[in-house]
Amino acid sequence: MFVRTLWIRRLILAGGAALAALAMLLPWWRQHDRLRDFYDYGLVMAGVGRIAAGERPYRDFVTPIQSGTFLFNSWAERAGGDTYRAMTGGAAVLIVLSVVGLALMFARRWPTWVALLLATALTAMSAVQHTIIWHNALGALTLVVAVWAAAVAPVLRGRHWPWLLLAAAALFVGASTS
């Protein structure tokens, strides 16, 4: 009976996360081919281009944002064909990973519907607000992951190492992008 219930819960979680991710992608889809904020997004595009040309942030050019933001956007750009629209694809990946990853994390401790609702709300308040991988959104999400992982594993014990590793990785990514 327990195995069947667990399988049904996982199926509901997967289906709910997929629906939530699709819902969160709707605002992104509406805006992904428009460049409405050249000041902020232009900063990222210029930084990615300068890094691709061999320059280094803070040494060769001044920037108000962390270099990790350029790194993630350059990966998205390279994966999608070196265009602005490829950068927006990186934001779509961030949105999907946020909803699914947070829902999986929260579902380990909370009921499925609570996990889905909270994951969707946190993604809507962060990653959905931008059409590229933006430092504030990624910073907020990594902070959520780090705090949750630290709350689940507040003591240094051997069995907690996956949560502690997740917290450390989230803090590193957050620090390099926010």
Image (spheres, grey):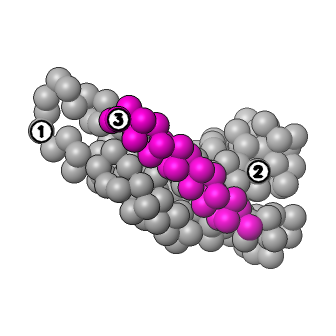
**Foreground of the two, 92 or 138:** 92
As for residue 144 lying within the magenta part, the answer is: no
Amino acid marked by disc 2: Gly
Q: Secondary structure under badge 3? A: loop
Label 2 neighbourhood size at 10 Å, few (<14), some (14-19), many (20+)?
Answer: many
Q: How far across and down, in percent of the image, does residue 113 sit? A: 43, 61
Amino acid marked by disc 3: Met
Residue 115 is marked as none
Residue 145 visible in this rendered orientation of the protein: no
Q: Which residues are magenta?
A: 1-26
Q: How far across and down, in percent of the image, does residue 147 sit? A: 29, 53
The residue lying at 12 percent from left, 38 percent from top is 155
Above or below residue 4? Residue 44 is below
Q: How far across and down, in percent of the image, does residue 96 sit? A: 62, 51
Could you tell me how far apart the alpha carbons at marks 2 and 1 are, in whole angstroms? 38 Å
**96 lies left or right of 108:** right
Residue 89 is marked as 2
Question: Mark 3 or mark 1: which is in front?
Answer: 3
Q: Secondary structure under badge 2? A: helix
From the image, tell me which residue sits under label 3.
Answer: 1
Above or below residue 85? Residue 7 is above
**141 lies left or right of 95:** left
From the image, tell me which residue sits under label 1.
Answer: 155
As for residue 7 lying within the magenta part, the answer is: yes
Above or below residue 105? Residue 123 is below
Q: Secondary structure under badge 1? A: loop
Q: How far across and down, in percent of the image, does residue 12 sit? A: 52, 50
The residue lying at 87 percent from left, 40 percent from top is 81
The residue lying at 72 percent from left, 71 percent from top is 27
Which one is earlier in the sequence, the residue at label 2 or at label 1?
Answer: 2
